[in-house]
Image (cartoon, rainbow, N blue to C red):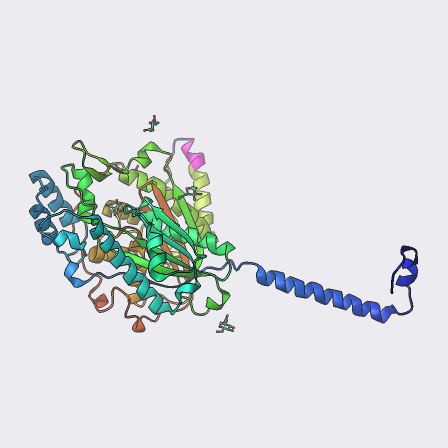
Amino acid sequence: MFIINLRDLPEFLTHPVLNSNTIVMMYLALLMGIFLLLCFVTNKKPSCKVYLIDFVCYKPPDSQKSSKEFVLKQATLHGYMTEETLDFMKNVLERCGIGDSAYLAETFFKPTYEPLMKDSRREIETTIFSSVDMLLRKTGVTTDNIGILIVNCCIYSPEPSLSSIIVNRYKLNKNIITYNLVGMGCSAGLLAVGLAKQLLQVHQNSYALVVSTESITENCYVGKDPPKFLINCLFRVGGAAILLSNRPSDHNTSKYQLLDTVHVNTSSSNRSYNSIIREEDNEGLPGVNINRDLLATAISTIKPNLITVGRLILPIKEKLYYQINYFIRKVMTSRNIHIQQYIPNYSNSVDHFLPHVGGKPVLDDLQKTLRLSDVVMEASRMTLYRFGNTSSSSTWYELAYVEAKGRVKRGDMVWQLAFGSGFKCSSVIWRAMKSVDYGCDDDNPWTGEIDQFPVQVVCGAFPVDFAPSG
Ligand SMILES: *[C@@H]1O[C@H](CO)[C@@H](O)[C@H](O)[C@H]1NC(C)=O
Ligand SMILES: *[C@@H]1O[C@H](CO)[C@@H](O)[C@H](O)[C@H]1NC(C)=O
Ligand SMILES: *[C@@H]1O[C@H](CO)[C@@H](O)[C@H](O)[C@H]1NC(C)=O
Ligand SMILES: *[C@@H]1O[C@H](CO)[C@@H](O)[C@H](O)[C@H]1NC(C)=O
Ligand SMILES: *[C@@H]1O[C@H](CO)[C@@H](O)[C@H](O)[C@H]1NC(C)=O
């Protein structure tokens, strides 16, 4: 047996077998070991890069297209309209920027409006299953590879949850991590992307499926309170499914890489909190109330989001101008001299700006404040015209629009911006990994009609008087 006595150690170390060559060899072996260990460790480290492999938007059947006349006709037929609400609805429909081909839910085509739970379920299942089927076919990803599922739907919350409905339908992995976001408004779709990003940073080699949708079947307000009537006028069927990945091997095949997400909320302010709220009217009928503070709160929530995004993406020159202007304004204001605020030119850095369609007054204000050209706003306005307010999925129809127009080139920066009740505002910034070859995309909802856009949408001032944004 070879036992080293402690007292023998110095002798052992200087033993002739361990001549300098052997020591060098041992040293090298040690280095080699450390190197291999490092490789192993760095390989294990989660990849922080998140890719968007592809996404799809649901396109309901033509039989659900509803012209503005039809919307009015059905509402009248369903017998809950008064002269006042009818006038209000006419006015809003004329000026809201929605065209005659957006889709209503099947229930509104019946002679009476008495939606059942099973009607809502049918609407939501059709939207979700069609989108997910399409996405799986388009990407070729198998269901057992999906490790994370996030569903968001504001107003419809069945039991079992929407995420369970999807897991059950597609027999997803029993280890799947699922989140079901409800009540989070139109910005929830981008919040879901932010959540997926955080999860992908700790779960390596995963696919995350994000499903964003909304249900309108049971959500028609049948009372007499005009502010609650807005939703009936603007809200339409839609949904999107998005596949994200952090697998390094998807670097070359994915469409976009996620650069940043920015979330802002002002829910702690009562004014902000109450600007969009679901409550009963005087007669006890539930509806979503949009009050006249909407514009002001929207702007005060969107603004800090824009500033943070600006910090992340604007070139140094713009940031410098902004800072200098800010400083001079501060100094001058104290001497009662008013200097105009410098608004950076975002169009220099962003190739595709995709703000949520909700609320023409908000969009108009945003365009004016940021001095954005009509071309920059085109995707948003055309999505509103063609598909209506589809809530959280709307920015995906907008991305599909710029793709269908063949405008997305490799390296382009894409900015999705959504805002909604809470009040919340979320931004997601992407970099295009390739020039999107639209030619082979039959699943794009704009396919077959993209050449008809943009159309000129003429509409007067919005008939609801919102408080100025100040
Ligand atoms: C991606 O493509 C580049 C060249 O186009 C290639 O060098 C690289 O190995 C590819 N990466 C992967 C993960 O396939
Ligand atoms: C609320 O805002 C804070 C900071 O403004 C942000 O860190 C947080 O993620 C936001 N939460 C949501 C749900 O938007
Ligand atoms: C905000 O709303 C809460 C609950 O409705 C109320 O108790 C509180 O007094 C309000 N705060 C202000 C500043 O109005
Ligand atoms: C912002 O920059 C874009 C692109 O460089 C330019 O076309 C546009 O006119 C600029 N807008 C303003 C308001 O300066
Ligand atoms: C758009 O639709 C969503 C549906 O959830 C609603 O919350 C939001 O208020 C709508 N926007 C406008 C301006 O009506």
Q: Ligand 3 is found in which quarter of the picture?
A: top left
Q: Quadrant of residue 135?
A: bottom left
* Viewport quadrant of the N terminus: bottom right
Residue 199 in the image, given as x and y percentages of width and height: 47, 53
- In the picture, the quarter occupied by the C terminus is top left
Q: Nearer the viewer, residue 348 or 180?
A: 180
Left or right: residue 19 versus residue 261 is right
Q: What residue is at 43 percent from the left and 31 percent from the top? A: 334
Residue 192 is left or right of residue 387, and the answer is: right
Residue 339 image offset from top left, x and y in percent: 38, 39
- Estimate the x, y position of residue 347 in percent, counting from the top left: 36, 56
User: Residues in magenta?
Assistant: 330-338
Residue at the farthest front position: 1
Confirm whether the magenta stretch covers residue 335: yes
- Which x, y percent locates residue 418? 33, 49
Mark yes or no: residue 283 visible.
yes
Q: In the displayed structure, would residue 432 be above or below residue 277?
A: below
Magenta span contains residue 105: no
The residue shown at (49%, 62%) is 205
Q: Is residue 125 above or below residue 115?
A: below
